[in-house]
Amino acid sequence: MILILRGPLLPGMVADLLMLDERDEHLIGYYAVTPLTRKGYLIHRLFLPSLLCLALSVLFFAGSGLTAVPFENAYAIALLPLEAPCFALFLAAYAANKVEGLALSKVSGLLFAGPAIAYFAPALWQLAGAWIPTYWPARCYLSGLGGEHLAALGCFAAGVLFHVALLGFMMRRFMRRID
């Protein structure tokens, strides 16, 4: 699962560093006066890493041999593209410049605790990992491997709600930061 999560984290970090560079150079203000607008800029910067993440995740699942049927974990694959914009927005919303962005990207290694909690922790203790975004794709993947398709669907629904709420929060925080 840790290897699977490399797919969203790397495009997310690239998008973040681009966003931080453009914010440091005050280019986002110039985008605001174009037909793209600030919100369009943000959607563009977050959509492409998500698309790349989806492609990488599908290729990884299909080529790795981790599952007997490559798409038995479609829920986990569907959640992974939401990870890249969450990661990018986290760094862009909380880092003041590129140097802080790189430092925070090192701290983001803690996000790999999500799959560890999903795999090793007893069921009741797994709720402690629910606030970590990487927990939800890991939980979906593990539920799908165990043949618990209804549990995987529930984890997928909870993961989508969590990621959408997190994206909304991070987007508002980033927009306040660039104003």
Image (cartoon, rainbow, N blue to C red):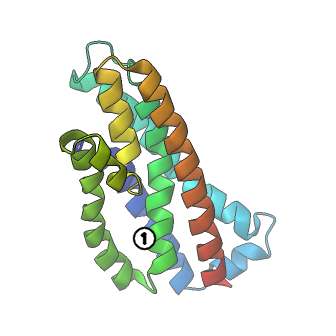
Residue 172 on image: x %, y %: 65, 71
Q: Amino acid at mark 1?
A: Leu
Secondary-structure class at tag 1: helix
Q: Residue at x 32, y 13 (%)?
A: 69
Q: Classify mark 1: residues with Cα within 10 Å, few (<14), some (14-19) or many (20+).
A: many
Residue 174: which quarter of the image? Answer: bottom right
Compared to 56, does 5 lie above or below? below
Single out the residue that lies furthest toward the top.
Answer: 69
- Quadrant location of the N terminus? top left
Query: At 39% from the left edge and 62% from the top edge, which residue is drawn?
Result: 13
Say which of 104 and 150 sits in front.
150
Q: Which residue is rendered at x = 35% and y = 47% of the image?
A: 135
Q: Is residue 31 toward the left or the right of residue 91 in the image?
A: right
Could you say where residue 77 lies in the image, as x and y percent from the top left? Answer: 42, 32
| Residue topped by disc 1 | 17
Please state the horizontal and vertical placement of residue 154, each as a whole percent of the image: 49, 31
The quadrant of the image that shows the C terminus is bottom right
Query: Is residue 131 or residue 133 the one in the foreground?
Result: 131
Number of labels in the image equals: 1
Residues 4 and 152: in front is 152
Closest to the observer, 49 or 145: 145
Q: Is residue 19 left or right of residue 64?
A: right
Q: Is residue 162 visible?
A: yes
Q: Residue furthest front?
A: 124
Q: Is residue 21 above or below residue 139?
A: below
Residue at the left extreme of this rendering = 120
Q: Position of residue 18 (x, y in %)?
A: 47, 69
Against 97, is 83 above or below? above
From the viewer's perspective, is residue 18 above or below residue 178? above
Residue at left 29%, top 78%?
A: 103
Residue 62 appears in the rendering? no
